[in-house]
Image (cartoon, helix red, strand yellow):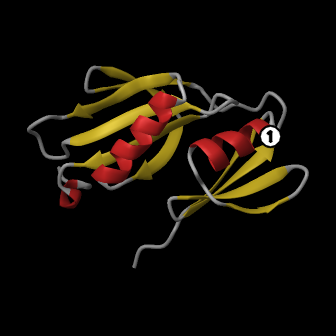
Amino acid sequence: MSRPFHLAFPVDDLEAARHFYGNLLQCPEGRSSSTWIDFDLFGNQIVTHLVPGGSQHAGAGAVDGHNVPIPHFGAVLTMDDWKALAVRLKAANIRFGMEPQIRFVGQPGEQATMFLFDPSGNALEFKAFKDDSALFAQ
């Protein structure tokens, strides 16, 4: 049985994180304190912790001819939700690390994907599969 994941990560500005995750990504806010905020990221619990200068961006790895930021996290969405999020992010003039696009066309695992960075520099990926059963296809 699948269960939600939990991820805690550093941010250097809680109010900027609250706006980015709560307003832009539309993640409902859970509990919070003066040093952390819980968010519901598509059914998963993420927690932003105030750590001045604590961004995790370490580098990039080559995938399908693109430099993918490492580390990164995100969610696998339905195609309709992915398209709606891409439109909302473009309208907000978000700087993408990789513009919304379709990757691995015609291959197992064909997917829509986009990479972006939160205000603290944490990399996020949102993707949707042409065929959800191909999530772990080889």
Quarter of the rendering containing residue 32: bottom right
Looking at the image, residue 95 lies above or below residue 43? above
Residue type of the residue flagged with mark 1: Glu
Quarter holding the N terminus?
A: bottom left
Q: Is residue 61 visible?
A: no
Q: Is residue 7 visible?
A: yes
Residue at image x 56%, y 46%? 25
35 sits to left or right of 86 = right
- Counting from the top left corner in percent of width and height, residue 17 is at 72, 41
Residue at image x 81%, y 52%? 36
Residue at image x 51%, y 38%? 124
- Counting from the top left corner in percent of width and height, residue 133 is at 19, 61
10 sits to left or right of 33 = left
- Within 10 Å of the Cα at label 1, are there few (<14), some (14-19), or many (20+) other Cα atoms? few
Residue farthest left in this picture: 106
Residue farthest right in this picture: 34
54 sits to left or right of 80 = right
Residue farthest bottom in this picture: 1
Residue at image x 66%, y 49%? 22
67 sits to left or right of 123 = left
Quarter of the rendering containing residue 54: top right
Q: Residue at label 1?
A: 15
- Counting from the top left corner in percent of width and height, residue 50 is at 82, 42
- Counting from the top left corner in percent of width and height, residue 100 is at 35, 31
Q: Under tag 1, what secondary structure? A: helix
